[in-house]
Image: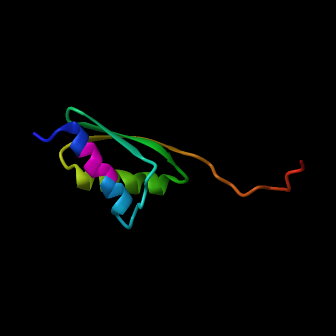
Amino acid sequence: MEAPQYIAARVQSALAEDDRTTELGIRADVRGDQLYLRGQVNCAERRDLIAEVAHEAAPGLVIHNEIDVVDVREPVGEERL
């Protein structure tokens, strides 16, 4: 069986290199047959794509998508200092 840290590194590389995600800010942790994804993205669609790419990179593992979707908006006005 492949070492957990190698599986996690493969998933993180896939997330960085896949054209659908190109994501560097997601952490992958492997515990037994469980893969945990953690980090933040700006929409639910991106969160789902990350889980899809991770599943392709580590088939057979149970994916726990713990990625948070954060609301990022344009400023509504000028900041006064």
* Label total for image: 0
Q: Which of 44 and 78 is in front in this view?
A: 78
Q: Quadrant of residue 5?
A: top left
Which residue is farthest left? 1
Please report the bounds of the magenta region as a residue range.
Answer: 7-12
Q: Quadrant of residue 3?
A: top left
Residue 19: percent from the left, percent from the top? 38, 67
Predominant SS along the magenta part: helix
Rendered position, 79 above or below 17: above
Residue drawn at the location 24% of the way across and 55% of the way down: 56
Residue 59: percent from the left, percent from the top? 20, 50
Q: Which of 8 and 47 is in front in this view?
A: 8
Residue drawn at the location 84% of the way across and 56% of the way down: 77
The N terminus, quarter of image: top left
**24 sits to left or right of 64:** right
Tell me if residue 68 is in the magenta stretch: no
Q: Quadrant of residue 15?
A: bottom left
Color theme of the render:
rainbow
Residue drawn at the location 22% of the way across and 38% of the way down: 4
Residue 11: percent from the left, percent from the top? 29, 50
Which residue is farthest bottom? 19
Which residue is farthest right? 80
Residue drawn at the location 89% of the way across and 47% of the way down: 81
